Amino acid sequence: MPLPRLARRLIMPLAMVLVTVVVFTSTPLLLLGAAAASPFLPGRLRPLRVLLFALVYLALETLLVVVLGLLWLAAGFGRRIDSPLMRRTHYRLAAWFLRALMATARHAFNLRVKVEGSPPHRGTRVPLIVLARHAGPGDSFLLIHELLNVQGRRPRIVLKDALRRGLPTSPLAAPESRIGFGFGFRTPTTTTERHQPGVGSHGQIDSRS
């Protein structure tokens, strides 16, 4: 039987903190294991770089969950969570989280994102509808990072099941969609494209690891 929503919202931050403490307490052993495995795996110190990224991600995720829990409490147990102030705060938190995560990926994996084409000017307030094929959390992070931190947008997510049911949609940007000005990523395992009348463009992920 699932826990009540209120109990989950109170327990989740505490559980995340506990897991993070346990993992970081075990960091010396994890580093030794990753260093020992590095000579037997392709790539330069790949296990250590993956471990570095995982530790940073865990720390950021835990901090974010705790802060979001505090914001939920500050919003009167969620009653004022949809206020303009709370919306702005959540967008800023998401932008900060993605900037830190992308910076770590650039250093750990030499991640580079190349965008070709002519996206709307950053100051343009024309709504965009983003349609993308979700190929994993990495694609979602890259796409929302582009929207939040590069294009200065405020994405609103609509899952494809909701679209199938024909629910009304407003100008949105979804991590499972492709940017209206034609934003795309290509990886060795997946290809996604973006289209706009009169625009044909692609982007590439170059992750040499």
Image (cartoon, rainbow, N blue to C red):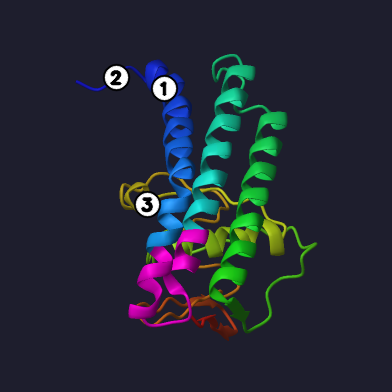
Q: Amino acid at mark 3?
A: Leu
Above or below, comparing residue 204 to residue 174 in the picture: below
The answer to whether 63 appears left or right of 189 in the picture is right
Foreground mark, 3 or 2, reads 2
Q: How many marks?
A: 3
Secondary structure of residue under mark 2: loop
- Give the alpha-carbon distance from disc 1 to disc 2, as whole Å: 10 Å
Label the magenta part by its dominant secondary structure.
Answer: helix
What residue is shown at x 39% (from left), y 44% (from top)?
167
- The residue range painted magenta reads 34-52
Q: Earlier along the polypeptide chain: callout 1 or callout 2?
A: 2
Residue 163: mark: 3
Residue 110: image location, x then y, percent:
58, 77
What kind of residue is marked 2? Leu
Location of residue 131 in the rendering, given as x and y in whole percent from the top left corner: 47, 65
For the residues labelled 1 and 2, say whether their Cβ atoms are less than 8 Å apart.
yes
Nearer to the camera, 140 or 25: 25
Is residue 38 part of the magenta span, yes or no? yes
Distance from the alpha carbon under mark 1 to that under mark 3: 32 Å
Tell me where residue 160 sits by quadrant. Answer: bottom left
**Residue plotted at (48% across, 81% down):** 44
